[in-house]
Image (cartoon, helix red, strand yellow):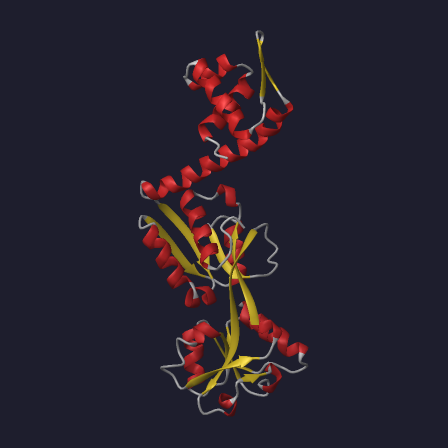
Amino acid sequence: MRIDPVSLRLFVAVMEEGTIAAAAQREHLAPAAVSKRLSELEAALDTVLFLRSNKGTQSTAAAHALLGLARNVLNGLDDIAEQMAGFGSGLRGHVRVFANISAITQFLPDDLRSFMDAAPMVQVHLQERISTAIARAVADSTADIGILNAGDYGEPLGFLPYRTDELVLIVPGNHALARRRRVRLREALNLDFVGAHPGSVMNDLLHRAASEAGMPLRLRIQVSGYDAMALMVAAGMGVGVLPRLSARLYVPSLNIKAVALDERWAKRQLVLAVRDREALSPAARVLVEHLARAGGQPAAA
C-alpha cells in the first residue's frame, strides 16, 4: 500500500471544508484534480471514503476514522520537514547547557563533538554545575538543557535517560587496597577520604553510605574538581571516589589505582533535564535528541 501525503492533505481539506469545490479552492486546484486524488486514495486503501450522488459527496464512517490518523501523519511530516530544514539551511542558534562534572569528563566531549560536526553553526555554551544547581537553572530557564544525576530535585522538569556510569575507589598506587579488584565501602571507611565539595551529589552519597554502614566518613580535605581529588590521592592525602571513566584520565599519569566498588549505589544514571521539550528552540531540541541517541535512548523518548 502506497499512500500519497498530497492525497491525505486534500482528503483532510475536503473533510474540513465540507465539499470538494471548497477544498479545491482552498488548495488552489481544480475540483476534478481533487476528486481524482480522492479516488486514488480510496483505491489505495480499498475503502469507500465518500458516497457520491447528484447532491454532492457524503463522508462515510471510514472517512471520519481516517481523519484523525491523517492529521497525525501530516503533523509528523511537518515536524520532520521543520527539523531537517534546519540542517539543510544550516541549523543556527545558541544552546545553554549546564552539566555536572561526571558528564563533562566522561561523555560530553565526544557527544558534543559529533553534534557540532553535524550542526556547525550552533553554538553550545557549556557550564559545569552541581546537580542541584543544574535542576534549578533549567527550571528557571537559565539553562536550556541540564545533564545531571537522576533524582528528585523538587523542580517541575522533564527527564530523559542519558548515560550510566560507575563509581570506583581511587587509592595511592602503593596502598594495600590497590591490589584488590573489588572492595566494599566499609573496608575503606577507616581511612582518610579526599572528598568532593559540600552540596555535591558525590559528597551526599558518601555521607549517606557511611551512615548506613554505621561508620563515620573521615574527610581529611574537600576539593572542587576531579583533577584536584586525583592529585591529592596521589600525594597520599587519602582515598577518593570518582566515576570510572573519569578516573581513567588520571590513572596513567599519577601513582593511583582505581578499584571497583562492590555497592549497588555505585551504578548511577545520568539524565537530560528540560523544562518544556515542546518549547525548546529547534537547535536545543535537536541537541536533546542527539544526546539521547548518543546514550542509546530513542530520540522520541
Q: Position of residue 52 (x, y in %)?
A: 57, 14
Residue shown at the point (43%, 55%) measured from the top left? 97
Corner quadrant of residue 71: top right
Residue shown at the point (48%, 74%) measured from the top left? 244
Q: Nearer the viewer, residue 61 or 89?
A: 61
Residue shown at the point (45%, 66%) measured from the top left? 101
Q: Position of residue 146 (x, y in %)?
A: 49, 55
Residue shown at the point (34%, 54%) measured from the top left? 116
Q: Is residue 100 above or below residue 33?
A: below
Q: Is residue 2 visible?
A: yes
Q: Is residue 199 visible?
A: no
Q: Position of residue 11 (x, y in %)?
A: 51, 23
Q: Nearer the viewer, residue 113 or 123?
A: 113
Q: Is residue 21 above or below residue 149?
A: above
Q: Position of residue 104 (x, y in %)?
A: 42, 64
Q: Nearer the viewer, residue 296 or 278?
A: 296
Q: Is residue 204 above or below residue 76?
A: below
Residue situated furthest top in the rendering: 54
Horizontal placement of 105 versus 156: left or right?
Answer: left
Q: Nearer the viewer, residue 294 or 157?
A: 294
